[in-house]
Image (cartoon, grey):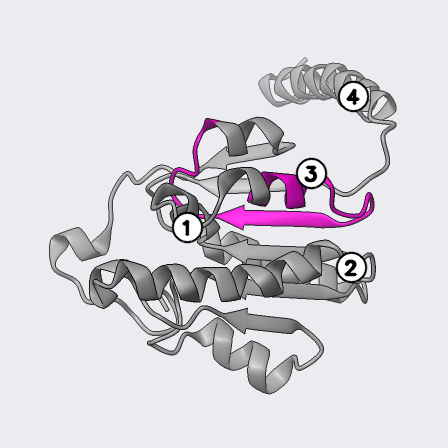
Amino acid sequence: MTDTSRKNQKHKTAMEKQKVVVDARIEQASDERGVAVLLTGNGKGKSSSAFGMVLRALGYGQKVGVVQFIKGQQLSGEEIFLRDQLPQVAFFQMGTGFTWDTQDRSADITAAEKTWAFAESLLRDPAFDLVVLDELTYMLAYSYLDETKVIDAITTRPREQSVVVTGRGGGSALREVMDTVAEVKDIKHAFAAGIKARKGVDY
């Protein structure tokens, strides 16, 4: 047997074993329902990942809602695309910009509560297959929204509805109720090296 043949056989044997494990896990996953996903961590890509799921859901003809907390003063590519090209997506922005820009806690709380009212209406509506709550974690971290109320809305949403929450932190209580929690780790970032945020990449 040649060296290439041995490598091919070793690979085939390894993949056969892996397939058995994967098939068994698929067989065990019998609970058919929507999932709650938290995308957190200090790295870049949390919102980008959530918008990837938006496109995925739309590809299947599903009904999608997107609520953005914090963002809104500076136009982003996703906002432009949703408003101009995907009017079927229910889209709402808090519109105040970053908390360090506003420096007005009372106004931020008022805006957060107004935005949450819209988000809560989506979480109660079984017609929505996917709801994205972008940067929601900051509203909990700054105590702009009541944590118990937010978690209750997420856990009592329609059974078939999936929800994606993005943002750093969010607290242990939120993590506990989510089905999937993924942490994006910042290894290296262009901004730290003095490179300006890039249209189409960063916003």
- Determine whether the residue tagged by mark 3 lies in a helix, strand or loop: helix
- When the figure is inspected, residue 192 is found, relative to residue 35, above or below; the finding is below
179 on left or right of 45: right
Q: Amino acid at mark 1?
A: Met
Residue drawn at 13 percent across, 53 percent down: 193
Circle 2 residues within 10 Å: few <14, some 14–19, many ≥20: few
Residue 18 part of the magenta segment: no
Badge nearest the viewer, 4 or 3: 3
Note whether residue 53 is visible: no
Q: Which mark is residue 25?
A: 4
Q: Residue type at mark 2: give it.
A: Asp
Tag 2 residue: 125
Residue 139's label in the rendered image is 1
Q: Residue at x 77, y 60 (%)?
A: 128
Q: From mark 4 to mark 2, how far is it between C-alphas?
A: 31 Å
Q: Label 2 to label 3, Cα distance in Å?
A: 13 Å
**Neighbour class for label 3 at 10 Å: few (<14), some, many (≥20)?**
some
Residue that sits furthest to the left in the current view: 194
Viewer-side residue, 117 vs 38 = 117
With 50 as the anchor, is 183 left or right in this view?
Answer: left
Q: Secondary structure at mark 4?
A: helix
**First-in-chain label (2 vs 1):** 2
Q: Is residue 15 left or right of residue 83?
A: right
Secondary-structure class at tag 2: loop
What residue is at 33 percent from the left and 74 percent from the top? Answer: 199
In the image, which residues are magenta?
150-172
